[in-house]
Amino acid sequence: MWVKNGLKSVLAVLGKSDKKVAAVFGISPKPCHDAVMHLKAGAPGVPVWLFSLTEPPQETRILCERVFVNRYSLALFLQAQVRLWPYCVAIAVGTWTAEHGRWAMKLAPFLIPPFRVVLLNSWGGFFPGKPALILLHWHRFLLGAALSLWIRLTEIGIGCLHSGPVRRIQDVTAGCWRLVAYHVWRSGPVRRAGDISSSFLLFVVAKLMTWFSFPHRRWFKSIHGDDFVRPEERTAGRGVAKFVQQGSVWDVRGFSDFVDANEVRWIHWQQGEQASSIQAELEASRLFDDPRTFAVARQSEARGWKSSLFPMAPFRHLQKGTASQVMAPLSSSIWVDRAKLAALGVPHTQLTDTAWMLLFWKAAAAGWCCYSLPGEQQAGAQPDFPAQETEFFLRLCADPELRRLGPTAPDLSRGTISFSPDQQLPMRPGCIRVLVVSPFLPFPLAHGGAVRIFNLCSELADRVDFILVAIREAHDTVHYEELHRVFRHVYTVDLDEHESTDERIPKQVRAAQSSSLRTLIADVTERLQPDLRQIEFTHMAGYRDCASGVPALL
């Protein structure tokens, strides 16, 4: 007891108080929310401080007394040490939910005095951070990984033997090597024995990239250039031709022959047989009215806060009747401009998604646009593409011509800008054009700011052509039909960037910062030539310099 009281006295002199808080250290939003809910259920009176590498949802923020967000794990760990030192941390929760890397955050709970630790595992359970239980956790994790690998290899063996009689399903190793050979043989005769080794090497490198938390994503921005490419387009025809590919291996020979043999306007590429409505083709064709459009894809997933080499899906699930520009909209259903595709050339790769990534990358460097449309069903969360990203990255490193390229408008193709192609109205000759930039949607009329903007613009809509660019909050539903009664064009922007940590900037200003919004204002100004930019609310004043030559009214 004497030692304990003496230790408390020493800590008090060093600035430690008896005020209790609970700390949560997380990497992704869902585990953070689960950990905070666990603490609030077990000790509702203890304030919770959240330290997260990604922006948590609003429902998580409400439950926490303080939230700290920083994408750099070591910097956030050091910030936690400083912020928590004056308090008594009753309990520290870490999220060990199979996210790769970020060890500074995973080990942070063990370095926060008085070292009372609870861990959340990938199965949704909580356990004390004691050595024996941690060893048991790792044992279960490794056992589960081994079991998943065994099941995967078994599936590979069965899938690769589908072209002939299955004589030994149990021969998993043979099936795995047959998959490697199958990747090469599908694209033509094996000319080099090294082709098979390269397939196996790709698998190994992809695994290493996964284990080390995808370091190539950090290298990518410094490796590629910013040059543009201007391929010579061939003559465009009319109509749509469908190409169906079976399996995950890129059918480079079949697709190349198909592109060369057709003179249609568009090619509808599909991964396997699937239903395709006429309405879907009509929606795609409307987007193809823009001569800059290269491809239109059905949304397969929403990327959310998941990182990747470049955006491969819209940031959120798209509403029916809307579209969003995405740099590389990977999907199992893609409409592509045949003339532009022929100008770029069909790439030789092993994996299908890698081939499309290369095509989309070249298209972005040519200044062409790719779009996502809402899928037939609600999209899920975008998975990682370790093998596909690795193959793309290795080809980029090996090809100087490919490495010098860069997208012409990356901030417009992040999948954060949504619009309704069917409801956009042409500008009327002789009318004043006003671009309205708003920090929220002016409809529904849920608060005074929305009522003011919507009704003032509505009263002038018969004499003024209004263009709306507005920030969409996380759970907003956009009522395009009502908005288009007043605004000729409507664009909504999702915020997908972490707030600046510069405390010299007011928090309300930091919360509204978006490179996509800034670039969109400049793009709309160039295309639609407004006479005035009307910027709503003081914290949006920083967007006044997005386009020179057009007056801005605050």
Image (cartoon, rainbow, N blue to C red):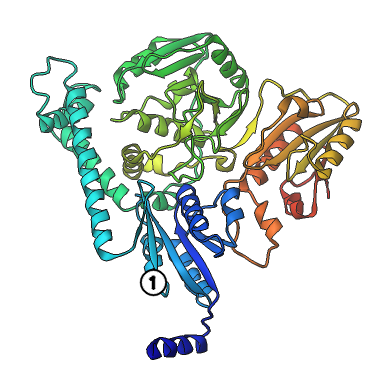
Residue at 40% across, 91% down: 2
User: Which x, y percent locates residue 182?
Assistant: 20, 25
Name the foreground residue: 9 vs 533.
9
Q: Which residue is mark 1?
A: 115
Residue at 58% across, 55% down: 63
Q: Relative to 338, say whether 89 is above or below.
A: below
Name the foreground residue: 294 vs 131.
131
Identified by mark 1, the residue type is Phe
Residue at 43% across, 61% down: 93
Q: Relative to 417, say whether 537 is above or below.
A: below
Task: Choose top left, top right, bottom left or bottom right for residue 162.
Answer: top left
User: Which x, y percent locates residue 449?
Assistant: 82, 44
Left or right: where does residue 219 sit relative to residue 508? left
Left or right: where does residue 125 sit relative to residue 316? left
Q: Quadrant of the N terminus?
A: bottom left
Residue at 44% across, 54% down: 27
Name the foreground residue: 8 vs 180.
8
Name the foreground residue: 312 vs 77.
77
- Is residue 192 something one can see in this rendering? no
- Residue located farthest toward the front when viewing the structure as drawn: 1
Q: How many marks?
A: 1
Q: Relative to 140, say whether 238 is above or below.
A: above
Give the structural element (helix, strand or loop) at label 1.
loop
Left or right: where does residue 309 sit relative to residue 321? left
User: Dot 1, crowdedness within 10 Å: few (<14), some or many (≥20)?
Assistant: some
User: Which x, y percent locates residue 325?
Assistant: 57, 32
- Is residue 142 something one can see in this rendering? yes
